[in-house]
Amino acid sequence: KMTYRSRGRSLLEVIFAVCFVTFLVGFITVLCIGNYFRAKRAQERQRQRRLAKLASYPEAGGGTGGSYEAPSATELGVQA
């Protein structure tokens, strides 16, 4: 039977290893979540800049005065 004892590890070492792995997984998770929200904010800022640019150049937005709307599939001639 292969237990932690048979491999020569003390209970303290096992507890330390579990704590270390838990910390590592938690740290990486926090980094990933933080990066996700940072990217989400950056995407929103980029969208706002794009809309502001379209509003400042109405001729580039098709003369709609900045209220840009993506063309629908039917406008593009795509049949469903």
Image (cartoon, grey):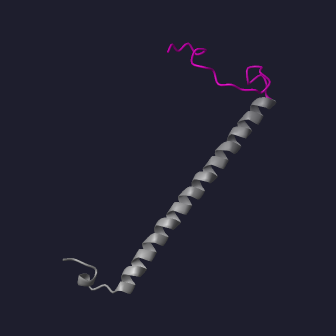
Q: Does the magenta stretch include residue 74?
A: yes
Say left or right for 76 vs 2: right
Q: How many marks?
A: 0
Front residue of 23 and 76: 23
Q: In this view, does 16 lie above or below 72?
A: below
Considering the whole magenta stretch, tell me its main secondary structure: loop
**The quarter of the displayed image where residue 75 is located:** top right
Is residue 26 depicted above or below 69 in this figure? below
Judged left or right of residue 25, residue 33 is right
> Was residue 8 drawn as part of the magenta stretch in this picture?
no
Left-right relation of 28 to 69: left
Q: In this view, does 76 lie above or below 19?
A: above
| Picture residue at 75% right of the left edge, 30% below the top | 54
Q: Which residue is drawn at 58% across and 14% down?
A: 74
Left or right of 56 on screen, residue 45: left
Q: Quick one: quadrant of the N terminus?
A: bottom left
Q: Where is residue 2 in the image (x, y as percent from the top left)?
A: 21, 77
Q: Give the range drawn in magenta.
A: 57-80
User: Residue 43, percent across and down?
Assistant: 64, 44
The quarter of the picture where residue 45 lies is top right
Residue pushed farthest left? 1
Residue at position x 66%, y 47% from top?
Answer: 42
Measuring 62% from the left and 52% from the top, which residue is drawn there?
A: 37
